[in-house]
Amino acid sequence: MTDRKPLYKGKSKTVYDMGETDTVLVEFRNDATAFNGARHALLEEKGRVNCAFDAFIMANLAKNGIKTHWLKRLSPTEIVVRRLDMLKIECIVRNRAAGSICKRLGLERGRVFSPPLFEFFLKDDALGDPLITEDHILLLKLATQEEIAKMKALTYKVNDVLKPLFAEAGFDLVDFKLEFGYYQGELLLGDEFTLDGCRLWDQKTGEIYDKDRFRQELGDVIKFYKRAAERLGIDI
Ligand code: UDP
């Protein structure tokens, strides 16, 4: 690979400049973090498993008319993506209650949300990624009303595509996080879709197949990531 300059090192991915104005290289690393980086571990094979999982999901979204940054896989742990100008916002859809919403609102874990619930969070580690309203987004000039509407609609559409896809493999898609950015004036899905950023429960047993295995120290994190991939027919 010629001249690659790290542009940004995130908690589990590194973004490299390859000298192209419109694309960047993303490397999925083996790092696992939780609680805003307070817990960290290196999990063997995580980068490869996440890269394969992300590729499968992005391809499925594209097939269903949702444009993403994803362009091609370069190696088992590397992809080439469109270079987006990212919005500092996290979009979350919840089909069932888990994690922060249970603590925040005192809801029972597992409660079904019908229709699914949408939430915005501010992407700001120093502030601990707080929940924000649409008015906060407008006040902070993080996005326009039109962009807010687009992000919400796209996130719901992703849920409409992925919920049945996971259900076919016997999984409940409990919640997930998306991030969007601009590419040549168009709002596209960026970042990643992996088991680090969603919650996935076995429909029959309720067994956890996502990063909560790491957060809750349940063990066998990558074993479950690989099992989920296998049930979805992902080649890793
Ligand atoms: N999530 C994420 N990155 C974040 C915050 C949340 O990927 O910085 C994902 C998380 O894995 C879960 C969903 O978004 O699938 C909802 O997370 P929640 O608000 O419950 O926060 P948590 O309990 O994970 O701190």
Image (cartoon, helix red, strand yellow):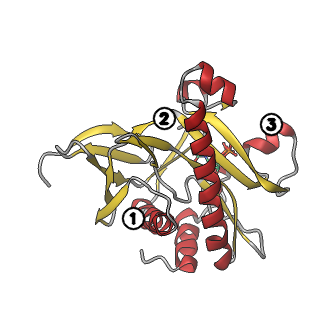
Q: Is mark 2 on a helix, strand or loop?
A: loop
Report the residue marked by disc 2.
87
Residue 222's place in the image compared with 4, above or below, is below
Q: Where is residue 82 in the image (x, y as percent from the top left)?
A: 33, 50
225 or 144: nearer the viewer: 144
Three-letter amino acid code at disc 1? Arg
Residue plotted at (57% across, 44% down): 150
Residue 214's place in the image compared with 170, above or below, is above
Q: Position of residue 101 (x, y in %)?
A: 77, 43
Residue plotted at (39% across, 39% down): 185
Residue plotted at (53% across, 73% down): 229
Three-letter amino acid code at disc 3? Arg
**Which of marks 1 and 2 precedes in the sequence?**
1
Report the residue marked by disc 3.
104
Label annotation for residue 144? none
Task: Specify whether residue 156 is in view.
Answer: yes
148 or 208: nearer the viewer: 148
Report the residue marked by disc 1.
48
